[in-house]
Amino acid sequence: MNRKLLTGAALALAAVSAIGIATFTTAETDSAAVTPAEATVPADRQMTIWRDPNCGCCDAYADYMEENGYHVTRIDDRDFDKRSIEAGVPEQGLGCHLAQVDGYYVSGLVPAEIVSRLTTERPEVTGITLPGMPMNAPGMGGKSGTLKTYAFAGDDITVFSDE
């Protein structure tokens, strides 16, 4: 009887130890997920982009944003369009990827100066979008001419920028 009790206690101790090690390892991994560079970059300059891994313009856009002082984390997500709609981007206004910066969503190839204006002015919107893949947008041929960017919040859609 004592042998069974001792064996059961040893198994329970082993299970608790395994859970503790797994928790400790996970905690280390989570805290290590923030790199020292990210810790020093202000929130309005940290951008996460969910993109189709086969989209070259999304990589060109991420490079463009990095050249404009943003720290960009790229996440491959073939369902970024579904994520965009769940985030509140109007279906008719989807861009070619979804980004998040300083609490706002940015859909599409929005120029850096417009993203900066969003995070500086801090309007009461969910985010902004540049629908589609305009040929004169950053990430495509480079910004040239005017681009119309829309703000969205719930069912409200307004022009945020036409420049």
Image (tube, rainbow, N blue to C red):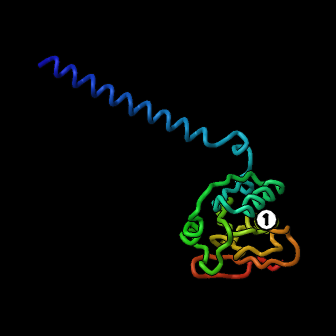
Vertical comparison of 31 with 54: above or below: above
In which quadrant of the rendered image does the N terminus lie?
top left
Taking the image as shown, residue 15 lies to the left or right of residue 113, namely left
Q: Residue at x 81, y 80 (%)?
A: 162
- Mark 1, other Cα within 10 Å: few <14 / some 14–19 / many ≥20: many
Where residue 29 sits, quadrant-wise, is top right
- Tally the numbered discs: 1
Taking the image as shown, residue 76 lies to the left or right of residue 70, namely left
Residue that numbered label 1 is attached to? 139
Residue 132, x across and y down, in percent: 70, 75
Where residue 121 sits, quadrant-wise, is bottom right
Q: Residue at x 59, y 65 (%)?
A: 80
In which quadrant of the rendered image does the C terminus lie?
bottom right
Residue 25, x across and y down, in percent: 50, 34
The kind of residue on which mark 1 rests is Gly
Taking the image as shown, residue 70 lies to the left or right of residue 103, namely right
Taking the image as shown, residue 125 lies to the left or right of residue 15, namely right
Where residue 141 sits, quadrant-wise, is bottom right
* Front position in the image: 111 or 153: 111
Residue furthest to the left in view is: 1
Secondary structure of the residue carrying numbered label 1: loop
Residue furthest to the top in view is: 3
Q: Residue at x 28, y 28 (%)?
A: 12
Vertical comparison of 141 with 21: above or below: below
